[in-house]
Amino acid sequence: MRALKIFAAVATVALMGCGAAWAGLGQPSPWQLGLQEAGTPVMQDIVWFHDDLLLVIITIIAAFVLALLIVVMVRFNARSNPTPSRTTHNTLLEVAWTAIPVLILVVIAIPSFKLLFFQLNVPPADVTVKATGNQWFWTYSYPDNGGFEFNSIMVPADQLKPGQLRLLTVDNELVVPVNKVVRVQTIGADVIHSFAVPSFGIKIDSVPGRLNETWFKATREGVYYGQCSELCGRDHAFMPIAVRVVSDDAFKSWVGEAKQKYGAIPTTTQVAASGQ
């Protein structure tokens, strides 16, 4: 294990020397190496599953196969072994190369199933947001906070302000409170889109006529970027997602301002009470 860690460290230094860098929190980095930094408990588990389990298993298997190939080339070439072996069967070896991969898959499957359950089991939500995918922008509504709705459209490159990210900055960000469970209900208005935010560990299709849902709980304030991850047409690459995570007080203040700016949409109960 120590040798494996040394090898990984040397490889990392070599890659970073070539311009690679660890991905940042909430956004990609130039020549990034690895997954984006985790901003939710789900993403923390995904990073652990990938980096501390799968990467270790894959590295060990690759090193073992490489060692076998070297042994075969050195010991069983025509010069070292002019009389080839006529061995055609080895029961122990055949049982081993069948049983060991099965055991490896079991080791991978147990935490994998736990992670899938954690991702798909939506806990009671503190805030619900509906994200509708359009060609080519997102529409967000807050049914639990007055029902107001607004569009989120990418800011063109020639209109960006200093510090804003090209192809990721939007005119109206999705705003949510920190350390709260946010349920995201998503649907497509025209074609299939996909709502994905890497640092949250979420990615779910927005399908016309079908309401899908996922969730996240951001543990740190800041802006987290994502994009539509489904090939949805000509401007697929130009419908980013920007989520601003703020404190509870800032979120309540923003909701009040958003109601004034976008206007609340009457709920079904309000419409029925008015007699319309």
Image: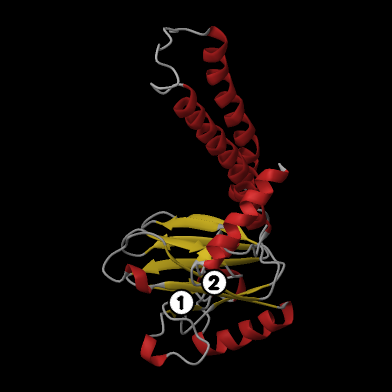
In the displayed structure, 109 sits above or below 274; it is above
The CA span between labels 2 and 1 is: 9 Å
Which residue is at the front of the view, 172 or 52?
52
Q: How is the image coloured?
A: secondary structure
Contact flag, marks 2 and 1 (Cβ < 8 Å) = yes
| Disc 2 secondary structure class | loop
In the displayed structure, 259 sits above or below 176; it is below
**x, y percent for residue 3:** 68, 44
Q: Which residue is mark 2?
A: 27
Identify the residue at image location x=64%, y=32%: 107
**x, y percent for residue 28:** 52, 70
Q: Residues within 10 Å of mark 1 (few under 14, many from 20)?
A: many
Q: Which residue is mark 1?
A: 168
In the displayed structure, 245 sits above or below 15; it is below
Identify the residue at image location x=67%, y=50%: 6
For the question of whether residue 116 can be seen, the reply is no
State the image quarter where residue 209 is shown. Answer: bottom left
| Disc 1 secondary structure class | loop
Q: Which mark is residue 108?
A: none
Relative side of 48 to 229, left or right: right
In the displayed structure, 205 sits above or below 75; it is below
Relative side of 218 to 136, left or right: right
**x, y percent for residue 29:** 52, 71
- Pick the quarter of the image with the C terminus: bottom left
For the question of whether residue 230 can be seen, the reply is yes
State the image quarter where residue 179 is shown. Answer: bottom right
* Amino acid type, label 2: Gln
* Amino acid type, label 1: Leu
Q: Earlier in the sequence, mark 2 or mark 1?
A: 2
